[in-house]
Amino acid sequence: MSRIPIILDCDPGHDDALAIILAAYNPKIDLRGIVTVSGNGAIDKVTYNALSICTLAKISVPVAQGSGVSILGSAEAATDIHGETALDGAPLPKPGFELSKESGIELMARLVRESSEPITIVATGPLTNVAILLKLYPELKSKIKEIVFMGGSASRGNRTPYAEFNIWMDPEATDIVLHSGLKLTMCGLDVTHQALVTKEVFTRLETLKTDLSTTIIGLLKFFAQTYNDVFEMPDPPLHDPVAIAVLIDPSVVSSRFVNVEVELDGKYTRGATVVDIYKREERAANATVALELDAKKFWDLMIDAIEAAGKS
Ligand code: BDR
Ligand code: CA
């Protein structure tokens, strides 16, 4: 079986942490490196969390620190959802290995350049690093197979009424990615709000009984509480691993290839993705947008990965 080489660009973050585990422990994915971006927390916090999760789950891939601010120089944190550390809810180990000396952008560029086959970039945070990579190294575009990102929505938002958090954090970067001409897959709130951590999911995690599953249960209980407090959702959506799951098994979602644009100037709608589901506009399709999730298939993949990681 040929494995899919990927770079994961993330801002851990509860759901990012589980995306790392799914990418590292699913046999169809070849995780070549992890890059961090400011999002759920400041860049030093999310980078620490990436190193800590890799230590906890015994994942040895290079981890490099990416951008600490958006293209326009802004940053904010999602402490209301992910807590002060960006990964509250369970004690995590001190990182057991060093951060890469390369910057996140340099690591991405080198991994893409050195790969003998085109690489897929999966972004589960703001698209800042990806946009910078495409602008600095346009010659590498031909070696990028696809960009899969968690972000946006074909309907409402979660950071503002119409903007999803990752896109809201860096609309200009999103615009660069949407107009890159590369193959794009968007996993927005439409589909990730179907990846709910239900009571049944907690029960499945409890049966694993490993140190890792115990830590994950602690993290997800925190995440469930904040989602309930902020969004009145008793079962929180595990957004980011959906962007890995679509690569492992495309039948996990059903999608439409349509035009997606991002609102840069809206008075109330900056950061909203405008998804032309019914093809009402002349604009050419540029992204495959996942809309429906097979939640059973998704959770089977996620639980299998947590089980495999717990035994490692
Ligand atoms: C996205 O925002 C972050 O808080 C999550 O990690 C996810 O990537 C969901 O809107
Ligand atoms: Ca994220």
Image (spheres, rainbow, N blue to C red):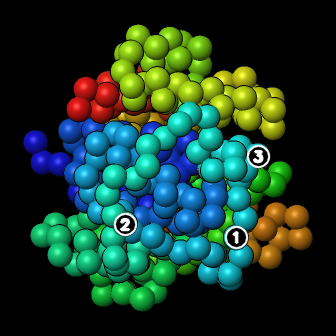
Can you say whether 87 is above or below 170 in the image?
above
Q: In this figure, which residue is indicated by the disc labeled 1?
A: 75
Distance of label 2 from label 3 (alpha carbons) = 27 Å
Q: Is residue 310 visible?
A: yes
Residue at (82% x, 63% y) in the render: 269
Question: Where the C terminus falls, by quadrant?
Answer: top left
Can you say whether 239 is above or below 129 in the image?
above
Q: Earlier in the sequence, mark 1 or mark 3?
A: 1
Residue 255 point in image, percent of width and height: 48, 44
Residue 69 point in image, percent of width and height: 63, 75
Drawn side of residue 264 relative to residue 125, left or right: right
Drawn side of residue 26 relative to residue 205, left or right: left
Type of amino acid at the residue the image marks with label 2: Leu
Q: Nearer the viewer, residue 26 or 100?
A: 100
Distance of label 2 from label 1 (alpha carbons) = 22 Å
Type of amino acid at the residue the image marks with label 1: Ala
Distance of label 1 from label 3 (alpha carbons) = 15 Å
Q: Nearer the viewer, residue 289 or 85?
A: 85
Q: Callout 2 environment at 10 Å: few (<14), some (14 to 19), or many (20+)?
A: some
Can you say whether 40 is above or below 229 in the image?
below
Q: Earlier in the sequence, mark 2 or mark 3?
A: 3
Q: Which mark is residue 80?
A: 3
Residue at (37% x, 87% y) in the render: 138
Q: In this figure, which residue is indicated by the disc labeled 2?
A: 99
Q: Callout 1 environment at 10 Å: few (<14), some (14 to 19), or many (20+)?
A: some
Residue at (73% x, 64% y) in the render: 76
Point out the frontmost of discs 2 and 3: 2
Q: Which mark is residue 193?
A: none
Residue at (20% x, 38% y) in the render: 27
